[in-house]
Image (spheres, coloured by chain):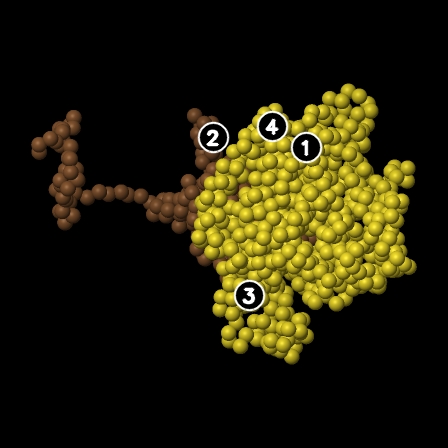
Amino acid sequence: MPTQEAPTPDLVLAAPLREEGADSEPSVVAVREEFGDKIRDVRLDADGCPVIEVDPDSLFEVLSYLKTDGGQAYDLLLDVMGVDHGGQRPIQVWYPLWSMKHGRRLRVVTQLPLDNLKVSSLASLWETANWLERETFDMFGITFEGHPDLRRILMPENYDEGFPLRKEFPLRGRFSRSEQTRRAMNRSREDVYAREELRMAGELKPELPPAVRPEEAARGHGLDGEHMVINLGPQHPATHGVLRLVLELDGEMVLRCIPHLGYLHTGFEKTCEYREWNQVVPYTDRMDYLAPMLYNIGYAQAVESLLGVQITPRCQVVRVLLSELNRIQGHLLWLGTTGIDLGAFTVFLYTFEERERVYNLHEAYSGARLTTSVTRIGGMMADLPAGWVDAMRDFANTLPDTLDEVERLLSKNSIWLGRTVDVGIIDGETAINYGLTGPNLRASGVAYDVRKARPYLGYDEYDFDLPVGAHGDTYDRYMVRVEEMRQSVRIIQQALDRLPGGPINVDDPSIILPPKSASMSSIDSMIAHFKLVMEGLRVPAGEVWSSIEASKGELGFGLVSDGGSKPVRCRFRGPSFVNLGALARMAEGSILADLIAVNASLDIVLGEIDR
Amino acid sequence: MPGAKERSNGTELLSDSRNLPIVDPADPGQTDTGVPHSWLTTRLDHVINWARRNSIWPMPFGTACCGIEMMASAASKYDIARFGMERMSFSPRQADLMIVAGRVTYKLAPVLRRVWDQMPQPKWCVSMGACASSGGMFDNYTIVQGIDTIIPVDVYVPGCPPRPEGLIYGLLMIQEKITGESLAMPGLRAESPEAVGAPNLPPETIELVTQPFGNSTIQNRVSGIEPSDAVQRPRDRRERKLEHGG
C-alpha cells in the first residue's frame, strides 16, 4: 500500500541548496564579471559544487569562455544531462565541468521552455558532447543546434513512441506489448542503419540524402567496388556484449567505424524514477555487473550528500575495502577477456580463479555473487560477518602472486607486445577532449583520479600511487590496470589495519531501519520502522552531481529530489559510455584486428553504456 | 624367454612391446576370446540421443550480468566441459543450444530471432535468469517481457543471476529432455518457414504473459508445462515414483 499523496510542507526538510558561499567562488566571480546579466542564478548544490544558471542563448559563449580562458580552463566536460521536473516546467540541461589545471569543479545549468527545446551544441568544443547530446536528444527531445550527427543513440533510429525520460512518457511505453513486439520484429533496413551507412554501402542514390558530413560528401558516394561495409556485432564474441560496430573497410584497414549502442538499453534512469531511494540500490548493481559494489557505494554517497548525512567511520573504511576489492574484480575480468580477445586463453582461467575468490568474499558478505546491493542510504546492508576480515587479508596477501604470474605470461610475450604496443594511441589532451577517465586517461599520461582530485571516503588518508602511462597505447592501458590492482591491494591492507569498531549505520531512525529486536519491543522504533517501510526514505528537495572513481573511470550520479520518497531524476554517468566515444578516433586508420585490441583495452561494459 | 616373469594366471609378462602377438584382421577368429564377432544391439533413438546430449555446442547469447555467470560456468571452477559443452560456438550455424543470458531489449529482439532462425535443427534454448525469462525487475518500455514471446524456450533457469550451479542444472535438464526424445515423435523438429522472423506467440498471448507479474505466473500454462510444486528433472520424478511405489 504505497502512499501517493504529495509531501505536506512541514515534512520537507530545509532544502540544502545554499545561496551563501557561491558568490565567492573564483569561477563564479569571473563569469559574473564577463557576462553580467546573462547569468540568471548562482548557487551551491548539496555537495558544495557551484552551479551557474545561464540563458540558453548565451550557453555556448559562457562554456566556450570557461573552456578556453586560462584562468578557468575547464577542460573536462563530465556530462550532459537533462532534467524534467514535470508539470509543464522547463527542462533543465546540466553541464558538470572539471578543470585539470586548477582542480576545480563547476556546473553550468540552463533551462529550456517546453515549446522551444533548442540549445546550441557543444560538439565543436568537446568531442564528449557528441554522444552525450545525442543521448539527451534521444531521451528528452532537446535539439542541439549545430550538432554534426543528431540522431537517436540508445533507442532504435525510427523509435516513434516519444522521448522516454519525459515525465509524460509512461514507464511501460505508449504502445501495448504486442504492438511493441510487432514493431520490433518488423524493422526495415532503414531502421537499423544510419543514412550515412547506407550511403557508404551504396544503398542510397547520391542525390537523395543530404550529406551529413562535408568530408563524406567530398569523398563521393558508394563503394566504387573497393570498400566493404561490415557489421561487427551485436552478437559477436569480441565486442564484450551487444555492441554493434558498422565498419567501412578498405581491405583490412578500418576507414570508418560507427558504433551503434542501445541493444541493451534497459531504461534504468526511467525505472529508478518509479522506485524509492533505497529501492534504486539493486538497479545500480546491474549496470556494472563486473564491479557492482562501486556502483552501490557511489549511489549511496550521492544520496547521502543530498541528505547531508555523515556516515560512520567504520562504514567509511568498509566502503573503501569493498571499493578496492571491486576495482580489482573489474580489472581482473578486463585482463581475462582481453587476453581471450588477443589469443591468450590461460590468463582468462587464472583471473577467473581469482574472481571466484572475490565472489566468495561477496557471497560471505551479501549472499550474492555479483548482484550484491550492499549499501543502504546511511550505511550498509549489514556489518561484516565473522571471519570476513581474515579472508579478505588472505586474498590481499596472495593476489599479487597471481598478478606476477600473469605478468610473466604477458608483459614480455612477443605476441602480446605485437598486438598491444603502439596500437590505438591517444594523447593526453585528445583524451581529455573525448572525456576519457579512469585507467584509459591515466594511460595517456594524465594523472587524474577522483580519489586524489576530490577525495571521498577519506581516500586522502591512504598511501597509494597513481600509475600513469607514457604513450597512451593499448600496452600502457594494460600496464596501468595491472599496477592499479597492486595499489588497490596496498589500500586494502591499510584499510584492514585501521578498520575501526563502532556502528556501521548512522544513528538516525528516519534513515536506517531500527534493529528487528527494537522494532518489536519499543513503540518509537516500531513507528520509525513503519514509516520507513510504508512511506520510504524522504530525501530533502535538492540537486547533486557527485562522482566516484569506478574501475572504468569517473562514475557520476546526477540526482534531483523534490522532497519525496522517489527521485525526480536519477542520472548515471557511466564512464564506459563516454570512453567508448573515443573508439572510432582510436581505431580508424588501423587494421581490423587492432580494432578488437583497442575496443578490449577500453574496458567497456554494455550494461553501463546502454543503461 | 630368459628373465621373463610370470603372472599369477600363468601368462607371460612381456619385457618388450615388440613381442606382442600380431592378430590378422582378416582372420579374427584366432584371438583367444573364442568369439569371432562382437555384437551390440540398441535403439537408434538411444544412440542418437546419447551422442546429442553429450556433445552439445552452446551458442552463448550473453548480454548482461547472466553472461558473466555463464563465463564463470565455462571457467576452471565450474567447467561445463565436464558435460561435453566446452565448445562455445559463437556462430549460430554450428550450434545446438542457445543460452540466452541476460536482458533482451526490443531493439535486440529481431537479432535474437535472426540468430535463432540461423541455428540448424536439432536445437534447444535455455532462458537464463529472470530478465530473459520474464523481464525480471525491468517492467518498462524497452525490455522484452520474456524471450518466449520471441523464440521458443525449453528450459527456464531462475535467478538474478542464477549461480553457475543453477545454469548447470538447467543444462542437465536439457540433457534429460534430449534423452526423452524419439525420432518417431510426430512434428518433433518441424519448423514452419512462416515462423522465420516472426514472434513466437500470437499477439493475444503476448498481452497475457506480459502484464505485470504475467510471465512468471502464466508461463507454465502457455508453455504447456504441467504445474508442479517443485522444479524437477524427469529423472528426479522417476526416482520419487519408485520411492512411493515401493
Q: Nearer the viewer, residue B215 or B28?
A: B28
Q: CA distance from mark 4 to mark 1?
A: 12 Å
Q: How many marks?
A: 4
Type of amino acid at the residue the image marks with label 2: Arg
Q: Percent x, y for residue A179?
A: 67, 58
State which quadrant residue A456 falls in: top right
Circle 3 packing at 10 Å, graded few (<14), some (14-19), many (20+), is: some
Q: Chain of mark 2?
A: B
For marks 4 and 1 on the same chain, the one whose residue lies earlier in the sequence: 1
Q: Which residue is mark 2?
A: B240
Q: Which residue is mark 1?
A: A317
Type of amino acid at the residue the image marks with label 3: Gly
Q: Are marks 1 and 3 on the same chain?
A: yes
Q: Nearer the viewer, residue A160 or B36?
A: A160
**Image vertical order of residue A106 relative to residue A389, above or below:** below
Query: Mark 3 against mark 2, which lies toward the viewer?
Result: 3
Type of amino acid at the residue the image marks with label 1: Val
Which residue is rendered at x = 77% and y = 49% of the image?
Answer: A105
Q: Chain of mark 1?
A: A
Q: What is the display colour for chain B? A: brown
Q: Percent x, y for residue A73?
A: 76, 56
Contact, CB < 8 Å: mark 4 with mark 1? no
Q: Percent x, y for residue A406?
A: 48, 43
Q: Which residue is mark 4?
A: A389
User: In the image, which disc is placed on residue A27?
Assistant: none
Type of amino acid at the residue the image marks with label 4: Val
User: In the image, which disc is placed on residue A589?
Assistant: 3
Write down which chain is painted yellow: A
Query: Mark 2 against mark 1, which lies toward the viewer?
Result: 1
Q: Chain of mark 4?
A: A
